[in-house]
Image (spheres, rainbow, N blue to C red):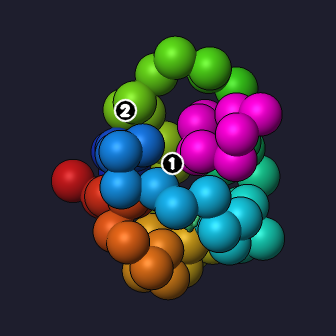
Amino acid sequence: MSMKVTLIPERCIACGLCQTYSDLFDYHDNGIVKFASAEDLLEKEIIQDASVLEAIKNCPTRALIKD
Ligand code: SF4
């Protein structure tokens, strides 16, 4: 099963938490979230992944969304 993950960089406070759950996430030089494999994408379809779901759940500002 797949799931869509959306990033909302305007909400990101560069806390660095999401990458501790999943390498799907990486950061720009200023610490704002991006996808590790796709610099400029804000949406990505991925295989359902418990670690990514945890990251989404734990983001303090809801900058990560699962559709
Ligand atoms: S957990 Fe949320 S606020 Fe923290 S770096 Fe990741 S996207 Fe940004």
How far apart are the alpha carbons under marks 2 and 1?
13 Å
Measured along the vertical axis of the image, is residue 11 above or below residue 15?
above
Measured along the vertical axis of the image, is residue 41 above or below residue 4?
above
Any atom of ligand 1 within 8 Å of the CB at mark 2? Answer: no
Which numbered tag is attached to residue 43?
Answer: 2
Which marked residue is nearer to the observer: mark 2 or mark 1? 2
Q: Are marks 2 and 1 in contact (CB under 8 Å)?
A: no
Q: Which sits in the foreground, 55 or 28?
A: 28
**Place of residue 8 in the rendered image (x, y in percent of width and height, measured from the top left):** 34, 45
Which numbered tag is attached to residue 16?
Answer: none
**Place of residue 25 in the rendered image (x, y in percent of width and height, measured from the top left):** 66, 48
Q: Is residue 43 left or right of residue 19?
A: left
Callout 2: 10 Å neighbours few (<14), some, many (20+)? Answer: some
Quadrant holding ligand 1?
Answer: bottom right
Residue 7 picture quarter: top left
- Residue marked by disc 1: 47
Callout 1: 10 Å neighbours few (<14), some, many (20+)? Answer: few
Point 71% across, 65% down: residue: 16
Q: Main secondary structure of the magenta part?
A: loop
